[in-house]
Amino acid sequence: MKRTARRLLWLAAPLALAAPVIAAVTQAGSPSGPSPAGNPLELKYHTPSAARGAQIAASSCQGCHGPSGVSTDPTVPRLAGQVPSYVRLQLAAFRAKLRPSPVMQRVAANLKDQDIADLAAYFAARPPGPAWTTDPALRARGEALFQRGDAARNVIACAICHGAHGRGEDSRGIASVTNMSPGYALKVLHEFKETPSFGGIPHPEAMRIALQPLQDADLRALAAYISSMQ
């Protein structure tokens, strides 16, 4: 259990550090007011440029995440259509080495605050990639869980936070999950479920609690549905 907690610490650490400034970072062009000294997740930038973000993405991102952020590898996350606040937070976490990934840490190390903001604006402006092909029966089960939950098992509908179309909520840093890469989606669902607790950190703790009643078959069904929403 302790090893699992350490392995999954990245899910909590970025938001724990970001809590005092996340509203300013996600809702405005630059942080407003003082923030904790040395917070590695605080970004300072001018109005983001999606056009400049496209140039950066072409040289730094598309090799793995695909043109326009539409990955065709089921294990590599799609970035197209992702809410900008979520992209900014994750890139800042990679740059600060709070989220593990040797490749992403190397890429993010070369990004300035403005680069991160511009990339987030670019990917947010792109439409989500096409739906992945999934098993119809599995997808139907996942749709029921996502849209309605399961009151008999205390399963909360994912749509309550992520929206009926899965597009998330930028002002609250809630990620878009529409047509997410299925293998990546399943991996992240397991990570949230297996982590012991995030304490008082709202978003990841809400995910952990929501996933506790679900079995592996349920998680596979959810991954099938969110990868094929459109």
Image (tube, rainbow, N blue to C red):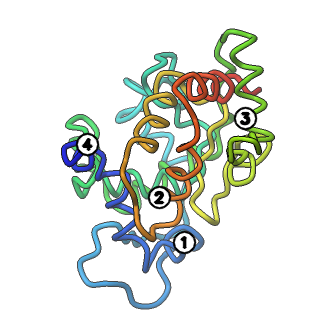
Q: Earlier in the sequence, mark 4 or mark 2?
A: 4
Q: Which residue is painted at 40% across and 39% down in the image?
A: 191
Query: Dot 2 surroundings within 10 Å: few (below 14), some, or many (20 or more)?
Result: many
Which callout, 1 or 4, points at the residue further toward the start of the chain?
4
N-term-proximal mark, 2 vs 3: 2
Residue at 62%, 38% in the rendered image = 177
Q: Position of residue 174 (x, y in %)?
A: 60, 55
- Left or right: 72, with 178 as reference point: left
Q: What mark, if any, has residue 29 been given in the picture?
A: 1
Tell me how far mark 3 sits from mark 1, CA to CA: 36 Å
The numbered mark, 3 or 1, whose residue comes first in the sequence reads: 1
Query: According to the image, label 2 marks what residue?
Result: 117
Task: Give the mark nearer the N terminus: 4 vs 3.
Answer: 4
Amino acid type, callout 1 = Gly
Q: Which residue is disc 4 drawn over?
A: 4
* Amino acid residing under circle 2: Ala
57 or 83: nearer the viewer: 83
- Label 3 CA crowd tier, 10 Å (few <14, some 14–19, many 20+): many
**Secondary structure at numbered mark 1:** loop
Tell me the SS state at disc 2.
helix
Instruction: Tell which of 71 and 159 is nearer to you.
Output: 159
Question: Which residue carries the number 3 mark?
Answer: 145
Q: Kindly identify the amino acid type of the residue bearing the numbered disc 4.
A: Thr
